[in-house]
């Protein structure tokens, strides 16, 4: 089979029909064309830019998501899951009856002693809902009445990359589309001038690496991949035309390029060429939309002060939170923040203190800011890492210092905003914070619930690849109805 | 003690009855009971399969009962086989629907108990009688849903051409859900100077707009005046525009309005009187508007069900 034949096989059905009028019986062709035309006529209210679904499966509560990913695995015991029993059993060995033979990572499996470690930080109840929050998060403590804490998250992965990949793509193995790509594919955009999936990574944190495949499109068409903004003064490079080069010149250049690309498409039929064209067109529109979206000079001091000092330093977590609000205002569907450095195997008290200091105020400010603008009404905000941390100390338990290893069996994430019950704490861990005592929420349940809030039936948003239909929740996932408002 | 409890109960019922919602559009069997049977039972208990000799898909079948005899004792849910089977623990081999199938929800079981207790009539409507308050609450929701559905099906979808016209004026238009007649309409965030012509274009689809976002587009009272009535509007965002109480007056043709966003507008206390006339109002965003703290306080006291988001408190 020659190359042309091979490529012809890859062509979409519609192309096949329009290109091979001489190859099929006219009658059969007509019937098929009509059937196709009818399907299209029915969906015309929604545009191609509205994704494969055109509109949500059912009326959505959330129109967009801001996901504040705390990469590294924040300890639940120093943040939101208050465990007075650990005070009593501080220094005692983790009982086998609690561990139940669970695998540990290679980092602490060899330890001869697994001493339980209490949180060195104090907890208090806050807000009308009385949620427990540690002293490390005074600003978050101030907005607990808008938050729904899920203290019974659990995952299947025990190391960073598989665990983050699992959260973002529904599989521990790389190669599946990420959440934002699924949304871009399914629902498209609410603002054709900005990408529907934007990724912002804090520059004021480091730690376990993040790979760009975490916002990759997997097997979906490549125009659905996340667009990462750089963490600094120029989040998108080369937005300005060079000196002497007008916007009209740019348009002309892109038109010629598109014509060339189209002729290549006629020759090869490679659908990826159209994705490339779409990306050039997006880049062209971003020359106008991005400077407008990113120009924070119109933000008054009162708003900047709310986010904290870091907000004036582009690329920090605080600056990214403010950016997230501005992008949400402009209809970006999925805004993915990453803040690294929550991986406190040792020196936890100092490490987590810094992490909280760098994120707490801006996180709370983002919620307040969204709320006062009415955006929390239809924006879902998510805070959480890829797993939790062990209740025993990794390394030596010393007065004032300890570490914690990875722990997939229980941890806390929270959601706030569109369609989620505010001021709620859902699920419970056991007294030692090792296993889940009530209402476990699996990663696939979390994903199913998020899609549900966006008006998507997680079982119906699928993509056929290599002979089977894939979805974000694979063959799993139950909606956590109890947390829906 | 029991006597006292009952007296108390009657007292509550009387108190509630002073504020009875009209539920006369509800046909108890057709609207409440039959959908439960259809959803949970008739896959097996129909006139062809007749599992256990029982057909729950017709009135005759229900009255006739199954292989063990009658399944309903009108007036007493307690001795009705149908109700008992639904309330058995899931593992019980007599439980219905059988283990592994979707259970009948607590709420639906409660409704069926009430239906049987009050005579298991097949043509009963709800009118003025004494109804336990939990049942009344459910019936009220169902009644509203029913009305809402009827209204939606009577609403004509807008034509694709009209939507295209609106889009050409810089609006993003989407169905609330696939095939839904109501629309979600937003102004392009890059459009900073909306005109009367743009608002005029909207008039072609105003009947169908449920959510409208006109934030930060240079809107003022004079331009908004152009907007025709929006009877199905549920949420509107007018924030960051130089509009005043006058604009709120235009919203009186939208009785279903639940959410109004007025942050960073010139709307002042003179709008309060107009706002509180919207009987379905649930949420008001007033941060950085000209409505004073006193004004907000007054609304909060008189209308505690309206959620007001003012300052970031």
Image (tube, helix red, strand yellow):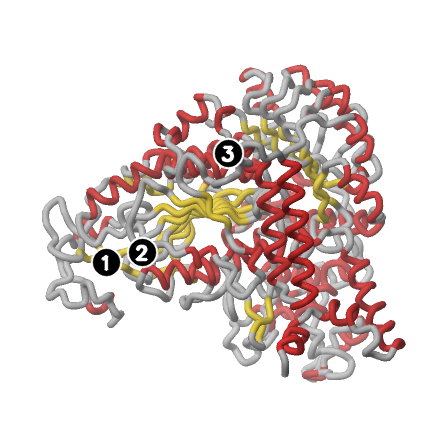
Q: Which residue is mark 2?
A: A388
Q: What is the chain identity of the residue bearing mark 3?
A: A
Disc 3: which residue: A294
Check chain identity for marks 1 and 3: say if they share one.
Answer: yes
Residue A87 vs residue A346, the one in the foreground: A346
Relative horizontal placement of residue A418, taking residue B270 as reference (left or right): left
| Rendered residue at 48%/61% (across/down) | A445
Instruction: Confirm whether residue B96 shows in the render.
Output: yes
Residue that carries the numbered disc 1 in the rendered image: A405
Q: Nearer the viewer, mark 1 or mark 3?
A: 3
Q: Earlier in the sequence, mark 1 or mark 3?
A: 3
Residue under the image location 55 percent in, 21 percent down: B288
Picture layout, residue A60 above or below residue A161: above
Frontmost residue, A440 versus A398? A398
Query: Residue A280, percent across and down?
Result: 60, 49
- Residue B8 can be seen, yes or no: no
Quarter location, residue A52: bottom right
**Mark 2 falls within which chain?**
A
Q: Mark 3 packing: few (<14 Cα in 10 Å), some, or many (20+)?
A: some
Question: Which one is in front in this view, the residue at disc 2 or the one at disc 3?
Answer: 3
Q: Chain of mark 1?
A: A
Residue beneath the point at 40% across and 49% down: A69
């Amino acid at each position: 089979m020659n190359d042309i034949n091979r490529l012809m096989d890859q062509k979409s059905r519609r192309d096949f029909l329009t290109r091979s009028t001489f190859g099929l019986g006219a009658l059969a062709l007509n019937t098929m064309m009509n059937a196709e035309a009818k399907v299209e006529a029915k969906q015309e209210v929604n545009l191609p830019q509205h994704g494969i679904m055109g509109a949500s499966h059912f009326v959505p509560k959330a129109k967009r998501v801001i996901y504040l990913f705390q990469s590294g695995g924040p300890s639940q015991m120093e943040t939101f899951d208050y465990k007075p029993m650990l005070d009593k059993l501080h220094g005692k060995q983790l009982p086998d009856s609690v561990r139940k033979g669970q695998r540990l990572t290679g980092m602490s499996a060899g330890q001869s002693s697994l001493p339980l470690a209490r949180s060195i930080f104090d907890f208090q109840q806050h807000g009308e809902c009385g949620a427990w929050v540690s002293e490390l998060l005074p600003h978050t403590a101030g907005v607990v009445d808008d938050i729904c804490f899920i203290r019974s998250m659990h995952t299947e992965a025990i190391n960073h990359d598989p665990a983050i990949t699992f959260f973002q793509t529904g599989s521990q193995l790389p190669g599946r589309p990420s959440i934002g790509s699924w949304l871009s594919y399914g629902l498209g955009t609410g603002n054709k001038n900005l990408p529907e999936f934007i990724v912002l990574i804090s520059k004021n944190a480091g730690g376990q690496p993040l790979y760009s495949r975490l916002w990759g499109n997997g097997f979906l068409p490549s125009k659905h991949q996340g667009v990462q903004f750089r963490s600094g003064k120029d989040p998108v490079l080369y937005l300005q035309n060079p000196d002497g080069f007008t916007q009209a010149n740019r348009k002309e250049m892109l038109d010629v390029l598109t014509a060339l690309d189209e002729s290549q498409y006629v020759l090869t039929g490679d659908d990826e060429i159209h994705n490339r064209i779409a990306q050039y067109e997006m880049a062209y529109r971003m020359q106008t939309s991005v400077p407008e979206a990113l120009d924070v000079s119109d933000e008054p001091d009162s708003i900047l002060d709310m986010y904290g000092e870091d907000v004036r330093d582009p690329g920090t977590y605080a600056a990214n939170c403010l950016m997230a609000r501005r992008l949400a205002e402009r209809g970006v569907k999925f805004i993915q923040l990453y803040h690294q450095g929550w991986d406190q195997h040792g020196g936890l008290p100092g490490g987590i203190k810094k992490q909280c200091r760098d994120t707490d105020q801006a996180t709370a400010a983002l919620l307040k800011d969204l709320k006062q603008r009415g955006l929390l009404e239809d924006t879902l905000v998510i805070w959480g890492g890829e797993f939790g941390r062990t209740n025993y100390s990794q390394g030596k338990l010393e007065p004032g210092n300890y570490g914690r290893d990875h722990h997939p069996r229980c941890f806390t994430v929270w959601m706030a905003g569109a369609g989620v019950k505010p001021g709620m704490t859902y699920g419970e861990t056991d007294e030692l914070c090792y296993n889940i005592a009530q209402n476990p929420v699996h990663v696939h349940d979390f994903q199913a619930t998020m899609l549900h809030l966006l008006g998507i039936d997680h079982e119906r948003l699928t993509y056929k690849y290599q002979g089977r239909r894939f979805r974000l929740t694979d063959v799993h996932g139950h909606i956590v109805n109890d947390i829906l408002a | 003690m029991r006597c006292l409890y009952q007296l108390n109960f009657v007292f509550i019922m009387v108190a509630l009855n002073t504020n009875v919602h009209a539920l006369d559009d509800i046909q108890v069997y057709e609207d409440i009971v039959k959908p439960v049977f259809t959803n949970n039972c008739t896959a097996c208990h129909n006139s062809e399969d007749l599992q256990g000799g029982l057909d729950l898909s017709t009135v005759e079948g229900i009255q006739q009962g199954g292989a063990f005899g009658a399944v309903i004792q009108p007036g007493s849910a307690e001795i009705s086989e149908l109700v008992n089977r639904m309330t058995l623990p899931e593992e019980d081999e007599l439980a219905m629907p059988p283990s592994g199938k979707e259970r009948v929800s607590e709420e639906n079981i409660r409704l069926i108990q009430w239906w049987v207790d009050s005579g298991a009539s097949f043509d009963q409507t709800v009118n003025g009688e004494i109804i336990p308050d939990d049942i009344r609450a459910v019936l009220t929701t169902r009644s509203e849903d029913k009305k809402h559905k009827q209204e939606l099906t009577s609403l004509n979808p807008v034509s694709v051409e009209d939507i295209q016209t609106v889009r050409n004026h810089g609006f993003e238009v989407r169905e609330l859900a696939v095939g839904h007649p109501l629309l979600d309409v937003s102004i392009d965030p890059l459009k900073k100077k909306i005109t009367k012509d743009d608002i005029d274009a909207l008039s072609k689809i105003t009947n169908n707009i449920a959510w409208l976002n006109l934030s930060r587009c240079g809107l003022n009272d004079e331009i908004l005046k152009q907007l025709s009535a929006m009877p199905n509007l549920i949420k509107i965002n007018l924030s960051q525009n130089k509009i005043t109480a006058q604009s709120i007056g235009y919203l009186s043709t939208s009785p279903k309005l639940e959410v109004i966003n007025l942050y960073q507008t010139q709307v002042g206390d003179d709008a309060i009187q107009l706002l509180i006339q919207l009987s379905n109002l649930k949420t008001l965003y007033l941060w950085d508007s000209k409505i004073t703290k006193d004004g907000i306080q007054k609304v909060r006291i008189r209308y505690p069900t309206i959620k007001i988001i003012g300052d970031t408190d």
